Amino acid sequence: MQEDFKAIEFKDESLVLIDQRVLPGKLEYLTYRTSEDVAFAIKDMVVRGAPAIGGAAGYGIYFALKEAKGSWDAFIQKAERIRSSRPTAVNLMWAVDRMVEAVKKSGMDLVAARKEADSIVEEDIAMNHKMAKIGAKVIPQGARILTHCNTGALATCGWGTALGVIKQAFYDNKGIFVYADETRPRFQGARLTAWELCRAHIPSKLIPDSAAATLIRDGKVDLVMVGADRITTDGDVANKLGTFTLSVLCKEYGVPFYTVAPITTIDFNMKEGKDIPIEERDADEVKRPGGVLVAPEEMEVFNPAFDVTPHQNVTAIITDKGIVYPPFSMNIERIKNGEEL
Ligand code: MRU
């Protein structure tokens, strides 16, 4: 199964991205041909979602290699620019490191670099479909699922992580119902997840983020399923701001809390969530949503893009290598060693 749109596509020596800043009002494609422009597209969230950022970065590195014209130093400088375009999603650093390694190994060969970038995209799509099949097993018949941010085909190189599992359950005729958090302040839930849910005709409702507490308390949510931007070896999960709140609610009311992510989202070099760099974004995202001023101009703002859910609040992490249950550090180590769970 596949979507009828591609958030990321490489054609005619160009990276073509859906402009996720203007959905759902407009379905517009933007074309990129330089490493600098790809870094900007990531930073400005034309493309967003951890695996999608990784996929776009692969082609950004390919452009960097072209532009460097054989100079290793120039290449590394450009690669660094892409690597630092957003700090939290580890898929970005993972993709850049993988590309730099491939470029080094091939003696700065363009064809090899292009192939590596294509592989990152193809492998991500395959991992998503695998997770969808693995994850759908934890979704009971008739489940009412609450999700946060956007984790679908737009957030990945194709199909999705948490939303990929949810779609699979829908196509498996599980009779599911989805509550989508609007996800302030960038509204990825309202603008992107709702768009994907409507396109797929999945029974669903959009809710203000704060309505989740009432729904969960009243027994109207059977499970919460979200994505991740970085998972540490202890099993702590960085994801879109508001995820932590949902996990606390789930713990309080005994609702399963699942996170879905490919192993490219696991940072095997980081043990605890407190060490994850959390991006802080512009004040205007909060003060001026959609360009309309909703707070005094002089008001100061704290706008972290992500929060960290402690592993104690996570029921299980669904990966392409199987479902990771507690004890997370032991089971993540098994995955690191190549085991399938
Ligand atoms: O700031 P964004 O839109 O890039 O944040 C995206 C998320 O937090 C997603 O939940 C996460 O990247 C997983 S996407 C499959």
Image (spheres, rainbow, N blue to C red):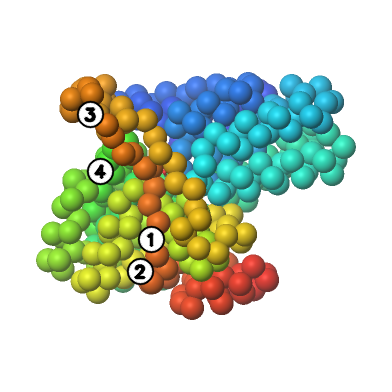
- Mark 2 touches mark 1? (CB < 8 Å): yes
Residue projecting furthest to the right: 107
Mark carried by residue 114: none
Q: Secondary structure at mark 2?
A: helix
Residue at numbered disc 1 = 309
| Whole-number angstrom distance, CA of label 3 to CA of label 4 | 24 Å
Residue at numbered disc 4 = 182
Q: Secondary structure at mark 4?
A: loop
Question: Residue 219 appears at what percent x and percent y?
Answer: 15, 68
For the residue pair 155 and 241, the one nearer the viewer reads as: 241
Query: Is 167 placed left or right of 13 in the picture?
Result: left
Residue at numbered disc 2 = 313
For the residue marked with disc 4, what is the amino acid? Glu
Residue shown at the point (61%, 45%) measured from the top left: 93
Residue shown at the point (44%, 54%) measured from the top left: 238
- Whether residue 94 is visible, yes or no, is yes
